């Protein structure tokens, strides 16, 4: 049996969890103040996932970059690959909240979407 210590990140409590595992299966979780901590420990041991937030370049916009995020959590081991792919992406203004900026990022089946509006740059000549 193995004991893994981790901090739950589901809520602001930041419970110090002790997770007992056997053959990569969760046997017991202690230190959690709620059942969400228990569920987090199970997911973190068996299939850790994260939301990815970042920015990408915008051409012709009021802002030079737009903030983006994954539509849902992606496998933790894919984070760096996704970030590398985002580095090379540029979108043209206007950009609207929810616009898909990248489809199926890093073959996860998950899209990257804009989280803020970026209007076209206007010139007053």
Image (cartoon, rainbow, N blue to C red):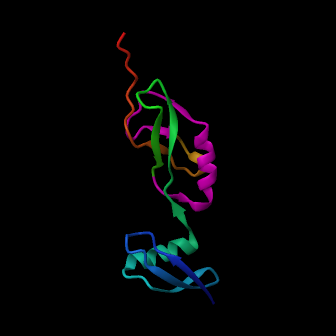
Picture coordinates of residue 112 (x, y %)? 49, 45
Question: Most extreme residue toward the front, as rendered?
Answer: 125
- In depth, the one of 75 and 79 nearer the eye is 79
Q: Is residue 125 magenta?
A: no
- Location of residue 113 (image quadrant): top left
| Left or right of 94 in this view: 4 | right
Identify the residue shown where x is 53% and y is 63%. 49
Q: Quadrant of the N terminus?
A: bottom right
Picture coordinates of residue 69 (x, y %)? 47, 48
Q: Is residue 86 magenta?
A: yes
- In this picture, which residue range is highlighted in magenta? 72-101
**Can the viewer see residue 63 in this picture?**
yes
- In depth, the one of 80 and 103 nearer the eye is 80
Picture coordinates of residue 31 (x, y %)? 44, 85
Image height of 125 relative to 120, above or below: above
Image height of 15 relative to 80, above or below: below
- In depth, the one of 36 and 23 nearer the eye is 36
Image height of 63 relative to 111, above or below: above
């Amino acid at each position: 049996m193995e004991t893994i210590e981790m901090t739950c990140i589901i809520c602001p409590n930041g419970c110090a969890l002790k997770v007992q595992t056997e053959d990569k299966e969760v046997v017991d979780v202690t230190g959690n103040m709620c059942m969400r901590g228990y569920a987090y420990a199970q997911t973190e041991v068996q299939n850790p996932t994260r939301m990815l937030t970042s920015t990408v370049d915008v051409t012709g916009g009021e802002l030079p970059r737009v903030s983006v995020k994954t539509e849902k959590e992606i496998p933790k081991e894919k984070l760096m690959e996704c970030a590398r792919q985002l580095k090379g992406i540029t979108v043209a203004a206007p950009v609207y909240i929810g616009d898909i900026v990248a489809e199926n990022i890093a073959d996860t089946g998950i899209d990257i979407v804009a989280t803020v509006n970026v209007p076209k740059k206007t010139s007053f000549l």
